[in-house]
Image (cartoon, rainbow, N blue to C red):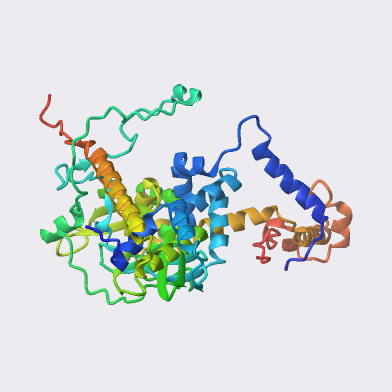
């Protein structure tokens, strides 16, 4: 069944849109400035940027404001904007070890080189409502800190490199990938290359990534990793200067990174660790860790567990895809539904069912030549089939 | 030590400079109405950020970053700038400032001094942020020996 166009008054659609906008503006509070969202609701803008696959904090704040806090809608707005822009270039590939970290913890190694830097987090405190915020307390609680000069930011040794030095992690083969797959320009084919998996997971919807990763931990999979480290920091965005040819830094993009070790001693002659990796725009540790678990799971290339099936994972984690498919069901499906109604009515008529769902005596008489199996509803093809209208 | 007279260093300082400051310098440079042609209009564009993942050490595309590049010729000297985000005025102003310094405009020393201040401020902010993070460095104690 195909779609048919429906018409409605443009003015009425505008009225509905204006009512939606009124929901944002009708309260007694002042209009929320984009700057306030950018500066104070960084988790929201991070999620929108991460799921859009587009780093632009101020535009993300605008999108969050326009979407009234709906992060997937905000990501949709950002992707739509992105589709109007030309690409200047690809950056020089950068190693995450160049990240200037504001936070780095290693759940695997207590005495990790460079130290356990908690950074800005509430991970170790109770989740209690802070009623002082009702008064709009804007004081900087670190103002009185007596901080020693810590020198220049250090390059923090990557835990994976430590394991690699001990021979506990296999040295990778030469990757031989000059031009990684770009899933924004070419469709993902299966089985997917790892670079495509990482790009798709990096812009996956946070809830979907979290849920699928959680499914692996809950027993629908074999991966239960130990996190080697979790980092938050800024990655330099570099291009080749068109005049000098030097690599120059345009900006710094805040990212969340996670690495996980997965023991595979039971499966190989040489006991070593396998790894999962997660990296995404903005501060979103939950998603980075979920991505790590899914990366490790997908490498098992299983078909029995959802998280290990790359096709299943990549088909379901994208927020734009799921948002579009789920929410499009709200749009007019009158022809589809009318067709279903017609089919059900025809089947009921053919089977001689009355309003109570029972076979009427009259119908029995009229259809007495039919094979009795034809009258059994369970033997009929299902009336609610998968719609082919999409 | 960054040198605003160096084209590559200047590019990074212009990218980190506030748009209003760049616009003020650009207005001052253009006050005498020097010949200016815009070689590349300031329009937001995308940079695909590539990262080498540490497991197999292969590059992948993390996502795109919005930037605004611009290029001008000012009094026979080329200038190029690229600033983060959607910032057309800052990008065009930055390209004019870059060309002005490249051509030895009379405002060069003022511009260079301001760019040095930008570099110092960023250095201080970076050091402060790192010191704050280091201030939260913790030694986790295992409790296995405690009764």
Tell me the residue at 14%/64% (across/down).
A270
Q: Looking at the rendering, in which quadrant would you find the C terminus of chain A?
A: bottom right
Q: Give residue B93's position: percent from left, percent from top.
A: 46, 61
Tell me the residue at 17%/58% (across/down).
A161
Tell me the residue at 22%/34% (across/down).
A147
Query: In the picture provided, is A326 more to the left or to the right than B120?
Result: right
Q: In this view of the protein, which residue sits in the foreground, A161 or A141?
A: A141
Q: Give residue A57's position: percent from left, percent from top.
A: 46, 51
Q: Looking at the rendering, in which quadrant would you find the N terminus of chain A?
A: bottom right
Q: Is residue A231 visible?
A: no
Query: In the picture provided, is B65 more to the left or to the right than B57?
Result: right
| Rendered view: B68 above or below A122 | below
Q: In this view of the protein, which residue sits in the foreground, A359 or A93?
A: A93
Q: Give residue B43's position: percent from left, percent from top.
A: 52, 66
Q: Give residue A299's position: percent from left, percent from top.
A: 32, 63
| Rendered view: A237 above or below B128 | below
Q: Is residue A304 visible?
A: yes
| Rendered view: A105 above or below A197 | above
Tell me the residue at 56%/61% (across/down).
A81
Query: In the picture provided, is B92 more to the left or to the right than A239?
Result: right
* Numbered-mark total: 0
Q: In this view of the protein, which residue sits in the foreground, A137 or A133?
A: A137
| Rendered view: A383 above or below B130 | below
């Amino acid at each position: 069944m195909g779609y048919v166009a429906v018409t409605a008054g443009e003015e009425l659609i505008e009225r509905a849109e204006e009512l939606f906008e009124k929901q944002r503006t009708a309260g007694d509070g002042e209009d929320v400035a984009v700057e306030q969202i950018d500066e104070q609701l960084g988790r929201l803008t991070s999620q929108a940027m991460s799921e859009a696959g587009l780093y632009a904090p101020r535009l993300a704040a605008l999108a969050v404001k326009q979407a009234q806090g709906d992060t997937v809608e905000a990501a949709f707005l950002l992707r739509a904007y992105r589709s109007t822009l030309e690409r200047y270039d690809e950056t020089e590939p950068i190693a995450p070890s160049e990240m200037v970290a504001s936070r780095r913890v290693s759940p695997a190694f207590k005495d990790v080189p460079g130290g356990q830097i908690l950074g800005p987090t509430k991970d170790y405190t109770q989740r209690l409502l802070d009623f002082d915020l009702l008064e709009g307390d804007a004081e900087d609680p670190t103002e009185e800190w007596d901080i020693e000069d810590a020198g220049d930011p250090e390059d923090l040794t990557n835990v994976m490199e430590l394991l690699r030095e001990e021979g506990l992690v296999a040295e990778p083969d030469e990757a031989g990938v000059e031009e990684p797959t770009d899933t924004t320009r070419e469709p993902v084919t299966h089985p997917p290359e790892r670079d495509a998996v990482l790009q798709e997971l990096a812009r996956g919807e946070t809830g979907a990534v979290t849920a699928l990763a959680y499914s692996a931990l809950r027993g629908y999979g074999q991966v239960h990793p130990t996190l080697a480290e979790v980092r938050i920091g800024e990655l330099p965005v570099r291009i080749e200067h068109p005049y000098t040819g030097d690599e120059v830094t345009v900006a710094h993009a805040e990212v969340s990174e996670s690495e996980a070790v997965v023991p595979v001693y039971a499966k190989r002659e040489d006991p070593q660790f396998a790894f999962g990796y997660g990296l995404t725009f903005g501060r979103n540790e939950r998603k980075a860790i979920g991505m790590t678990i899914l990366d490790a799971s997908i490498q098992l290339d299983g078909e029995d567990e959802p998280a290990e099936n790359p096709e299943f994972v990549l088909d379901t984690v994208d927020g734009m895809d799921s948002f579009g498919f789920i929410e499009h069901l709200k749009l007019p499906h009158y022809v589809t539904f009318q067709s279903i109604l017609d089919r059900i009515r025809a089947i009921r008529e053919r089977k001689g069912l009355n309003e109570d769902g029972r076979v009427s005596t009259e119908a029995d008489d009229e259809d007495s030549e039919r094979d009795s199996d034809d009258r059994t509803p369970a033997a009929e093809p299902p009336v609610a089939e998968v719609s082919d209208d999409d | 030590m960054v040198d605003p007279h160096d084209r590559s260093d200047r590019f990074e300082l212009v990218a980190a400079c506030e748009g209003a400051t760049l616009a003020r310098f650009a207005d001052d440079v253009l006050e005498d109405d020097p010949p200016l042609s815009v070689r590349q209009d300031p329009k937001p564009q995308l940079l695909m950020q590539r990262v080498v993942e540490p497991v197999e050490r292969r590059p992948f595309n993390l996502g795109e970053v919005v930037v605004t590049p611009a290029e001008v010729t000012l009094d026979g000297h080329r200038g190029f700038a690229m600033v983060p985000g959607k910032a057309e005025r800052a990008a065009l102003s930055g390209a004019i400032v870059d060309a002005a310094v490249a051509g030895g405009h009379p405002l060069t020393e003022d511009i260079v001094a301001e760019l040095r201040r930008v570099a110092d401020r960023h250095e201080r902010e970076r050091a402060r942020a790192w010191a704050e993070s280091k201030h939260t460095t913790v030694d986790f104690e295992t409790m296995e020996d405690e009764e």
